[in-house]
Amino acid sequence: MKPFKSITKLLIFFPYYIFHCNIFFGLLFKIFYNKFNYKNIKININIEKIKLSQLSSFLFKTYELNDRILIERFISNKNKSIIIGAGLGFIASITFKKLQQKILLFEIDTAILENLEDNMKQNKINYELYNKNLIMTENLNHSNFFYSTNNFLENSIYTKQGKK
């Protein structure tokens, strides 16, 4: 992907921090809503490990925007789906609504599993959930890949050495 030019970065910077990543709007969302609705999908956000600034993305419906657009444009009932890093279940819910067939979910963070399963049941999603990494070799384990942080949206962003 071609990197953005400086002027484009400047134009994107302000809207991003005013709407998508704003502490004030995140606080409003947490106090008054704490659930996210998109079309016929309802997602409860009963997780403490989300920064206030990131909650504003739910208010303005920019959460997982790129993934959502790709799924809505290119997924059809001819496809099969595996969701790696199921998170809140939003992408899984959109995918199931497009496919109308069982989907496989992988989520390694046990702190968010209850919320994920509640969202799947609430949206009547036919799914199979695995609480582990999807790995291709048996001599690796999840501790080589998964690092929990105080924000589930940023888990595993840093290695044990503190580097991205």
Image (cartoon, rainbow, N blue to C red):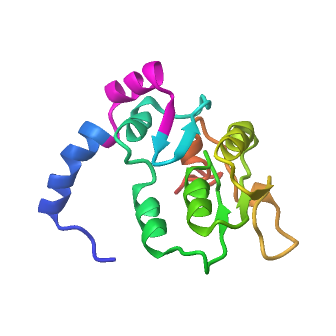
Q: Is residue 70 magenta?
A: no
Residue located farthest toward the right when viewing the structure as drawn: 138
Magenta segment, principal secondary structure?
helix
Q: Is residue 26 magenta?
A: yes
State the residue in front, 98 or 81. 98
State the residue in front, 9 or 41. 41
Instruction: Report how many numbered discs are placed on residues in the image.
Output: 0
Residue at image position (52%, 32%) is: 35
Question: In the picture provided, is 60 more to the left or to the right than 71?
Answer: left
State the residue in front, 27 or 91. 91
Residue at image position (72%, 59%) is: 105
Quadrant the N terminus occupies: bottom left
Residue at image position (64%, 65%) is: 100
State the residue in front, 110 or 66. 66
Residue located farthest toward the left when viewing the structure as drawn: 7
Q: State the image quarter where residue 43 is shown.
A: top right
Where is residue 23 shown, x and y percent of the image? 35, 28
Question: In the picture provided, is 53 more to the left or to the right than 48?
Answer: left
Where is residue 26 shown, x and y percent of the image? 39, 29
Which residues lie in the magenta part? Answer: 20-36
Asked if 85 appears above or below 2 in the picture, the reply is: above
Where is residue 126 shown, x and y percent of the image? 74, 57
Q: State the image quarter where residue 58 is shown.
A: top left
Residue located farthest toward the bottom when viewing the structure as drawn: 78
Asked if 35 appears above or below 63 in the picture, the reply is: above
Where is residue 34 shown, x and y percent of the image? 51, 28
Question: In the picture provided, is 57 more to the left or to the right than 47?
Answer: left
